[in-house]
Amino acid sequence: MPDARLIADLSWRQTDTLVLHVRGAAGERIVKAGGPENHHIGREIDGHLQAAEVWASAGHSARLFHADRDARVLLLDYLPGTLAFAAPAALDPAVHRRAGRLLRTFHDQHEIASEGVDAAATRRAIAWLDSPHAIEPATEARLRAALAALPPREEPLVPTHGDWQPRNWLVDGAEVRVIDFGRFAFRPRATDFARMSVQEWRENPTCEAAFIEGYGYDPRHPEHWKLILLREAIGTAVWAHQVGDVDFEQQGHRMIADALVDAHT
């Protein structure tokens, strides 16, 4: 789009991912780009090529026009709608019900056997604890003990969004649209429930019931769910510390406290 002009910079500034809303003769587009160490762009490309068509074909996610994995850049359709994050829609049960239906459609496309994926997720959580963080030593010891006590559960893997929450939903009237596949991967279904469970569902439990209704059933195994939340809490607190996101780091520490209570450690 040589004639494109910038409409808005939509970047979150937490990583080096650049998100630009542009307009040219071909219409409105989203340009996403990342630096040499950026892993999110590659995952985003994978998500669009491997799984997003089920949403894109119905207008629920953007169409991919161009992608260059080596240059870490992609060109997407611009989607109308208002970000649900930090808006009344974030706590609207009707929005969560629609989001549950969308996620079930995405998950149901493929299912593959897990061959050590869950065990690897626990090893990654331990690696987070081995890296720089601000978790108190006594709490870190409890986290390590809890990870050792909760065995991995190698459940079937499905395409997951990886960051399923109102921050990545656009609401347009009765429609919910999806953005940001930067954490796409094949994982157990329940992993896509984690973000909402410690945020919106904590504030408004009716959203959880509505989401499960939309999804059709609750895929969370009680013991495995404890492990999922524990790993999510560790990753949140450590990642946010390393990128300097103070508010998100505080959320991570709250998640750790809650996860340790649930894990009975």
Image (cartoon, rainbow, N blue to C red):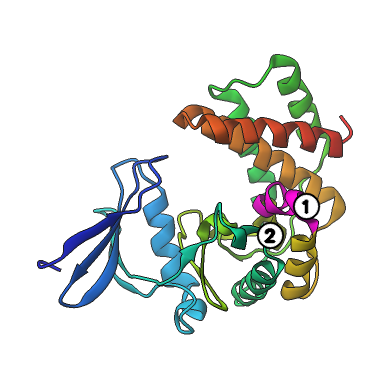
Which quarter of the image is occupied by the N terminus?
A: bottom left
Residue depicted at x 28% and y 69%: 29
The x and y percentages for residue 165 are 60, 57
Depth order, front residue of 231/32: 32
Q: Are discs 1 and 2 less than 8 Å apart at CB?
A: yes
User: Is 78 drawn above or below residue 195 in the view shown?
Assistant: below
Depth order, front residue of 138/175: 175
Q: Quadrant of residue 133?
A: top right
User: Is 235 drawn above or below residue 213 in the view shown?
Assistant: above
Q: Is residue 188 left or right of residue 72?
A: right
Residue depicted at x 79% and y 56%: 205
Residue sitting farthest toward the left: 2
Regarding mark 2 in the picture, which secondary structure is present there?
loop
Depth order, front residue of 5/64: 5
Q: Earlier in the sequence, mark 1 or mark 2?
A: 1
Whether residue 70 is visible to the viewer of this picture, yes or no, is: yes
What secondary structure characterizes most of the magenta part?
Answer: helix
Residue where numbered disc 2 is placed: 188
Regarding mark 1 in the picture, which secondary structure is present there?
loop
Residue depicted at x 34% and y 42%: 16
Residue type for callout 1: Arg
Which mark, residue 176?
none
The x and y percentages for residue 184 are 51, 59
Alpha-carbon span between mark 1 and mark 2: 9 Å
Residue sitting farthest toward the top: 137
Residue type for callout 2: Pro
Which mark, residue 153?
1
The residues colored magenta run 195-205
